[in-house]
Image (spheres, coloured by chain):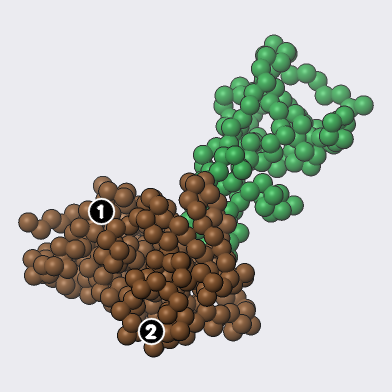
Amino acid sequence: MKRDLITPLDFSVEELDRLFDLADDIRLRPDKYAHACAGKKMATCFYEPSTRTRLSHEAAMLNLGGQVMGFSDAGSSSAAKGESVADTARVISCFADIMVIRHPKEGAAAVASHFATIPVINAGDGGHQHPTQTLTDLLTIRNLKGSLSGFTIGLCGDLMFGRTVHSLINALMRYPDIHFVFISPPELKVPDYITDALVERGITYEECVSLDDTISKLDLLYMTRVQKERFFNEEDYVRLKDFYVLDKSRLDMAKPDMYVLHPLPRVNEISVDVDDDRRAAYFPQVQFGVYVRMALVLTLLNITVE
Amino acid sequence: MLNVGKIEEGFVLDHIKAGKAMLIYHYLHLDKLDCPVAIIKNARSEVMGKKDILKVECDINTLNLDVLAFIDRTITINVIKAGEIVEKKQVKLPQELRGIIHCHNPRCITSIEQGLPHIFYLADDKKRIYRCRFCDEKYDSARVAEIWK
């Protein structure tokens, strides 16, 4: 039976442990995996713009000795002619061994996985889920903090439309002893289905507006961009886009071992003067993203390297 | 006073909120049945003021009545045999709703993709909350009432 990655919860905690162990082995011994996907093809089907996520998947496949093909906006695909996601998934299954899809509509990847006969990776479906970013975040945290439990994590910015945030919270809910601090403007609060789930599981969280008031108690700070494409109203976007700016003076209030993560691209929410701080983990995070996607491709294609 | 004859074998859906009988008629696909069906609208009720009633003269086991729990929790089901009530049935919320409601989230893939089934999974039994299988949009009874208004 084929495996897909549509939500971060598609893999059990044990499966994620194995995936992260594999990613760590790839990081330490990349040559061992350089030809693991020789003869395999990845189709990257991106219906909305992306630089990092598409290139990260493509880099992962190329690092494994495989090949890549695809499209990078809906206008250059059959979607412009009105082809459905279901039909595209069926067609791509005839060309490639694995499919990566990003689509502006929520649930599009689930539709693709239903109709494709090859493994499907969800590279973002609207404001809904972004599970490979979550795997990236988890692997980064595991490497920085040594484990995926026993810390206070602050999530700051657009917590309403930020799919990376939703996916990360869903994934972290399964690990013990994590306290969440949601820092957002009132208009961009984390959705109630997420806080409902936290309450149901007895996981502690707090919601606040001020980053300054809370930064000192955090072990990890996950910053997010306010995304223009998620707003129907330009005025709201302009009003909220620079609500939070993490600069050197704010970072000075944080613990000496509080790492800053960001799914990127950042705009103004992290000043460039933070980049040289050793706690700025958002560029190493990108590299972890390639390793974890390599491990994911191997896992979904059921390829074992001895 | 309106009189509708007793049924011998079948079931009666009582205490339907006034105005909802036709909705239930359609969701249970009663129009497809080749048996007597009586739709009583705005019947007088001491408790509800007005209520709707559906009387259906067929084997209750041929229909999936679980969906009633989602549509209207006040409904009671009386099973009739030999003209007498032999059982008052309770319905449970179904784990999945298919084609009962449509997702109204404009960001959901079902808003643009033709032919997709509208599927909702039971996310919270106690709070009677369903979520869209594709986008996780929340639908509770208040929202569904708004959609069906």
Marker count (numbered): 2
Q: In front here: B78 or A236?
A: A236
Residue A4's x, y, as percent? 31, 55
Q: Amino acid at mark 1?
A: Asp
Point out the frontmost of discs 2 and 1. Answer: 2
Q: Are marks 2 and 1 on the same chain?
A: yes
Compared across the picture, whether B11 is left or right of B95 comes to: right
Structural distance between the alpha carbons of marks 2 and 1: 31 Å
**Which tint is chain A?**
brown
Q: Secondary structure at mark 1?
A: helix
Chain B image colour: green
Q: Is residue A52 visible?
A: no
Please, what secondary structure does the residue beneath circle 2 have?
helix
Label whose residue precedes the other's in the sequence (2 or 1): 1
Q: Please state if B99 lies on the left or on the right of A36 as rendered.
A: right
How far across and down, in percent of the image, does residue A284 sit?
A: 28, 75
Callout 2: 10 Å neighbours few (<14), some, many (20+)?
some
Q: Residue at x 46, y 70 (%)?
A: A216
Q: Is residue A305 left or right of residue B135?
A: left
Residue that label 1 marks: A17
Q: Quadrant of residue A50?
A: bottom left
- In this rendering, the answer to whether A248 lies above or below A1 is below
Chain to which mark 1 belongs: A
